[in-house]
Amino acid sequence: MNFFDKHLPVLELARQACEARHCWSPYPEMPAKYPDAAAAQAAGRAAFEVHLGDTAGTGSRRRFALDQPGQVGWLGEEVSPYTQQPLAIDYPRADVDALFDAASAAMPAWSQASIETRLGTLMEVLDVLYREHLFELTHAVMHTAGQSYNMAYAGSGVNALGRGIEALVYGEKAMRLVTPRAHWERSFGPSQIRLEKTYRIIPRGVAVCFTCASFPTWNAWPSMLASLATGNPVIVKPHPATVLPMAISVRVFRRVLAAAGFDPNLVTLAVDSVAEPLGKVLVKHPKTAIVDFTGSVQFGQWVEQNAWPALAYTETAGCNTVVLESAEDLDAAIRSLATTLCMFSAQMCTSPQNIYIPRSGVRTPQGQVSLGEVGERLAAAVAALTRDPKKASMILATIQSPQTLAMLEGFRQQGADTGRVLLEPKPYPHPEFPQARTSTPLMLQVSTADRALYGGERFGPVSFVIACDSAEDALAQATADVREFGGLTAFLYSTDERYIAKAEAAYARAGAQLTTNLTGAMPLNFAAAYSDYHVTGLNPAGNASLTHLGFVAGRFGVSQSRRPQRSAA
């Protein structure tokens, strides 16, 4: 089957969306709008449960077969944040050199295929993920990353698929800019030189894609597709806590590639454990040509400093800021901030953390509202969202890692010593999973003298209301956070157009994406495929961006050959 022709209508609409940056998606945004939703959801849940070993604690485990080279054993240590029981799944542990050798052997035929063949095959991968595995993946993300069902479907499902198509659009654009051949002539004195020139796209080599614990698919699929579209094989290194979504993904990639006549070893899985990590081995392997990393600041910085001669594309973490200077409708601004602070228990790289407010308070049409009152109203709004367990389960979901709970307790104690605890964290009872690992948010009121407390990303449901000397000081403090610690997103509330213009310029220089005066149903940190750039690459939050030409163009080089023009026979 000609996959390119099959998927060309969707690809063309995606091209148009990327160019115009308008709202578009080929996929339904809500589970209930999926075709034959009830049957599809039931089948997806059943498919997920087939993967599980005996989760009752008897020790029986289930093996996830991939039939990839170099297998030297089995490994798995995932624990569901909802049940706090092991998934009891073992994945094939592979010899690293064998994976690289197999990837290198698979690359020539793939890289020599036409652009259309590669794009069509990869569009088919995304189509199969959507049609046959979306709800299976939804449950896999829930029970590894800890997201809610709706977020796992939307953010880690259809939106991640959209980001994947977006990467293909930019991959195609970058490659189409390289003309395959040219006729060139020029006079050199009395001589006329005529040359035939040929240009070839040459992939860099094996790519290693690291996936993160909280959003395994959202960055991984675009990274994998960017590398594959430009002719490079991919070794996927999932976080040990969230292997299953990527194992399912890798299996689908391998199946579709094989059906299209290519070596399935273009995509393989390299699992490891917390006790015996493979990350540095993979980054420093002599055959590694590209590294895509999403995860911690500490290891991300190591990757950036040590990946050479491989190219590194990173997204680490953000100390995301809010400046609340004035508001036309303070209640609406507070409701929007409260909702965004709660989304997936702030375990998102775009979650706001540091909320800067002038010590004199916030200007509104009704008069000045004191800093203390703003903090109390914000804490009350968060508490209202999390009071009902059913509502809390949909917005907060679970805490992915036990270490996050320990972090919250440490900051609660420090906050009580140095500032004021506006909101105490506490577990909430999940209505479906009584053993779920949960916590409501922690909110502290501090001053700029407490920068050691809030400086840097605190990954999880903790936020800081920070008293500043003035509106100018609030903006200066917030943008300093972005420059020093990294920031992906930033949020501003102001009715002063001159102040807004100053903030837009300051955040642009710092390299954070700014949202101003947004209220209503849309979460403040929602990032739309085909329209919103994710990460700028201009501050310590990461050096790559989803998605523009810079994300794909470096994954291949251009080789040329030239010779005198041959006369027609």
Image: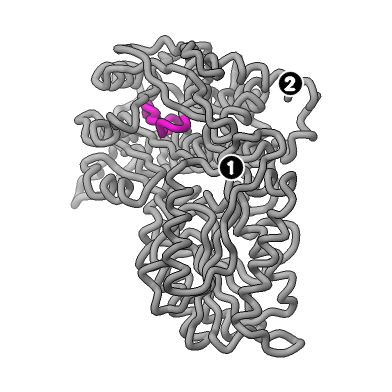
In the rendering, which numbered label is found on residue 498?
A: none
Amino acid at circle 1: Thr
Residue situated in front as seen by the camera: 85 or 346:
85
Q: Is residue 285 above or below residue 549?
A: above
Q: Secondary structure at mark 1?
A: loop
Q: Quadrant of the N terminus?
A: top right
Q: Is residue 411 above or below residue 390?
A: below
**Which x, y percent locates residue 173?**
49, 42
Mark 1 touches mark 2? (CB < 8 Å): no
Q: Quadrant of the C terminus?
A: top left
Say whether residue 448 is magenta: no
State the residue position of label 1.
Answer: 398
**Would you call the spot at circle 2 few (<14 residues within 10 Å), some (14-19), or many (20 or more)?**
few
**Would you call the spot at circle 1 few (<14 residues within 10 Å), some (14-19), or many (20 or more)?**
many
Say whether residue 229 is magenta: yes
**Which x, y percent locates residue 146?**
56, 38
State the residue position of label 2.
Answer: 42
Q: Residue at x 49, y 36 (%)?
A: 216
Q: Is residue 49 above or below residue 197?
A: above
Magenta segment boundaries in residue numbering: 228-242
Q: Secondary structure at mark 2?
A: helix
Residue situated in front as seen by the camera: 297 or 383:
383
